[in-house]
Amino acid sequence: MDRVTVGLDLGDRYSRYCAIDEAGKLVGEGRVRTEVDALRGCFSGEPARVVLEVGTHSPWVSRTLEELGHEVIVANPRRLRFIWNESVKTDRKDAEQLARVGRMDPELLQPIQHRGQEAQMDLAILRSRAYDRQIEQLCKDRYPETERLRGPKGVGALTALAFVLVVEDPSRFNTSRAVGPYLGLRPKRRQSGESDPQLGITKAGDVMLRRLLVGSAHYILGPFGPDCELRRWGLELAARGGCNAKNRAAVAVARKLAVLLHRLWVSGQEYEPFHHHPPRRLSAVPA
């Protein structure tokens, strides 16, 4: 059988779907209630590629469809502006557009990966910011890997647990350097000819974790931050001057900190303040 690609435009009560085959021919369409049993009944056939947009219902819908054996692609909404900008926009047309892009090249949609249900619930505890003892207990009982991530001074239980819950599966990144862009800590770029202006960060990914990492970076660069490679690098960057030099340095340190935390997680190594360079030696005190 030809592989079928289904575009699913999710709604609060009903969702529209549109199915096309490998040749791009329409083979089915309709609507289904946005409920578990209704979706199970509608998608109980042969495994297909199902493309849907991230939203309120996409986490549980994607899990439901994956349990039925379908390949589920959750599209990044930033990549769907060509749908939003249509002069004539309908749910049916949106579903067909999702199906056609998913059939050609899913990477054009920059698919995201929803975290598991348990991680989502634990992350909700963090967002409430009113359960310090419970956060410490979660770290101890369910996420012992956070202990290693708290090695760098300035990274506490909240930041370490948020990092683990947002990333969830560290093997999803081929390199640790990919974590910074995933969390929106990479600068935007609009290069054209001789013009290459300095722009702010993309601010993609989880807002809370990004703010926590920047807060940790400010501590590392602040008066109480201990001497370490990361602090030295950040202070040298800030000393170059220019507009908002300190803020840019904090964001850069936050990006490097995200890389460091991921590397500690996947390697199982303990944090070393001076991995590449030895600490500075204090001058001898004259007698």
Image (cartoon, helix red, strand yellow):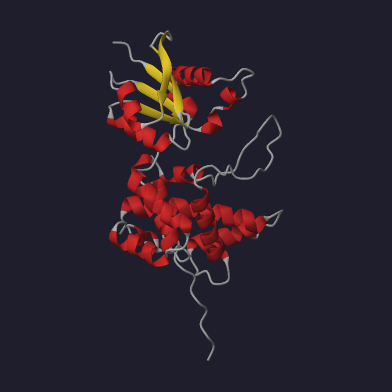
Is 47 in front, or is 18?
18
Percent position (x, y) of residue 136? 37, 65
Which residue is at a point 47% across and 55% down the rendered structure image? 127
Q: Is residue 169 visible?
A: no
Residue 224 against residue 284 in the figure, above or below: above
Quarter of the view holding residue 149: bottom left
Is 225 in front, or is 170?
170
Q: How many marks?
A: 0
Tell me: 51 left or right of 45: right
Percent position (x, y) of residue 201? 60, 45
Q: Is residue 83 visible?
A: yes
Which residue is at a point 31% across and 63% down the rendered structure image? 140
Q: Residue furthest bottom?
A: 287
Residue 109 against residue 284 in the figure, above or below: above
Is 41 in front, or is 128?
41
Percent position (x, y) of residue 213? 50, 56
Quarter of the N terminus within the rendering? top left
Which residue is at a point 42% across and 46% down the rendered structure image? 176
Residue 19 against residue 10 in the figure, above or below: above
Tell me: 182 left or right of 198: left
